[in-house]
Amino acid sequence: MNGLMLIDDFEKFKHGMELFLKPPDFSVGTTPSEMIFHEDKMKLIHYIPTVEKTHPVPILIVYALVNRYYILDLQPDKSVIKKLLDEGFDVYVIDWGYPSGVDMYLTLDDYVNGYINNAVDTITARSGLDKITLLGVCQGGTFSVMYAALHPEKVKNLVTLVAPVDFDTDKGILNSWAKSLDIDKIVDYYGIVPGDFLNSAFLMLDPFRLMIDKYVGMFDRIECKPEDTACQVRNEDYVKNFLRMEKWIFDSPDQAGETFRQFMKDCYQKNLLIKNELMLNGKKINLKNITMPLLNVMAEFDHLVPTDASKPLSDAVSSSDRETLVFPTGHIGIFVGSKSQKEVCPKIAAWLKPRSLQNGNGKIGSGNEEKTKSAKEIMNEQIKTIRRARVNKK
Amino acid sequence: MSESDGSCIEKSSFESAREFYDQWLKTYTATTGRLVDMPAVGPAREKSEKMMKGFSTFVNLYTAGMDTNSHFQGVFMEAMRKVKEKTAKDMKGEISPERYKEFYNIWIDTYSETFKDFSKSGNCASDMGKLNSTLMDFQEYNREMLEENYLKPMNLPTKTQIDEINKELYSLKKTMKELTGQIKALEEKK
């Protein structure tokens, strides 16, 4: 019995190694798209709509600088972008690229008032509208909040996904570590802060799980005998998914030093954004300028951006139409978890649809022309429908 | 309990190594450290003073490393003790391979949780801050020495010079973008 178990585990390991020796082809970010604008390293990507008539207001997704945007389009069946396209939206995303030495002096102002603003202008010029929906993810969400406060006239709706705005929380380990770092020394030495430097900090959050258990678990899941073809296919799919995620995790662009300096010092260390004291190019960011509809989405078990860091946004803005959604998942799970795929995107889409209407002359309505349903109302309706279907079945 | 039962875990600690290092550091600070920090004189004073500083930078890094190691070692010992407590009964006699997965799960859960608890503490943040700061000083010093003693004499470009060019490029690009924007706005007005 004991011997058989060991042989079985050895077989799993051997088979796993065989799969790795002939790694399956895998790709990320496969949803068809076109680059419509670029500036320095930044590219504005437009996804080809999958419906004939899209909702009038386009969505611009702003992702963080620390990892790559394709986590939102990791694989066809786990793609936030594809889901939004299928829900009838016209979707754009900013690809920040990989900064190099020449970008080391780029500031937060260059990112927010430069790149994001130019991307928004490009989209409005293409669509003939004067406002768009801004969907900011993680650090990209923080940037989107800054942008919406500085340019409210260009933002129809603001959706923030696991975005930190209040950095003074003891719930996040990163928040406490960031306070003890001498950011000036790091930026002065590196200039361009290596992505690996940040990645090592992420790994240190839970080194035993992230550097040992994850890989043990991967081999442990390989469970079938070489002659079982159906199982082999499942194995290969599993390894592909694992490799996609592994690629994304370690595909960490370096950081423009001056932006990193300002983001870490002004946000993580001094917490200026939520206090309405953050300055960009001499202009103070006042969150009260955010008057457009706001959907603030977060993950309950987020170890990188705790809900305490995101929730205060809802009270800091002036928007009368605002909603907060918390999903029982983690920071990455919210984009790629199977359950999240079924819940998060549909709810964002349901919230956005009635708020993406257009009036004549290319002007966009306030979103209040017709009574808009809140995501909670939509959720309740869905639950009622399911219950009714169950009763009918009985 | 005999040592073969695992009581050696209780006795193991990084403290003795730490005490030895503290003693060495005290002696160093009172003797060689003072010599190293002495102002240099003579025609090569600038160079030799910079070179002497390197040793202090290294000692600072080593001390921060020692503090971090000492705390990490404490965490590992605590995790090991917890694992021992959880598995003491099952570890008596021969361990069957059937249970190694169970042991693995206990081991990984305990180490992960203990380390996470430590990560949340102020000690961990302070260790990381000090270690990082002294590491940056040390790296910066090494780069400065490399530039001064090797790259400049060989007339090769240094990072400092490349950064100057990068700054100039950034500033030129920014001006160009501003001017392009202004021209566009003027054209639209026409």
Image: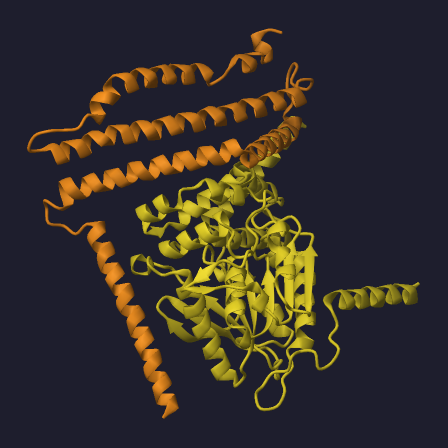
Query: Residue B88 at x, y = what percent?
Result: 66, 18
**Vertical comparison of A77 with A332: above or below:** below
- The image quadrant of residue A216 is top right
Query: Residue A130 at x, y = what percent?
Result: 53, 82
Q: Please name whichever residue, A300 or B3, is drawn nearer the observer in this view of the structure.
A: A300
B165 to the left or right of A356: left
**Vertical comparison of A299 with B43: above or below:** below
**Vertical comparison of A290 with A371: above or below:** above
* Picture residue at 14% right of the left edge, 40% below the top: B149
Q: Colour of chain A?
A: yellow
Q: How is the image coloured?
A: by chain
Query: Residue A244 at x, y = what percent?
Result: 51, 55
Question: Going by the picture, which residue comes out furthest to the left?
Answer: B43
For the C terminus of chain B, which image quadrant?
bottom left
Q: Colour of chain B?
A: orange
**Vertical comparison of A10 with A117: above or below:** above
Query: Residue A256 at x, y = what percent?
Result: 37, 56
- The image quadrant of residue A254 is bottom left
Residue A207 visible within the image: yes
A266 to the left or right of A2: left
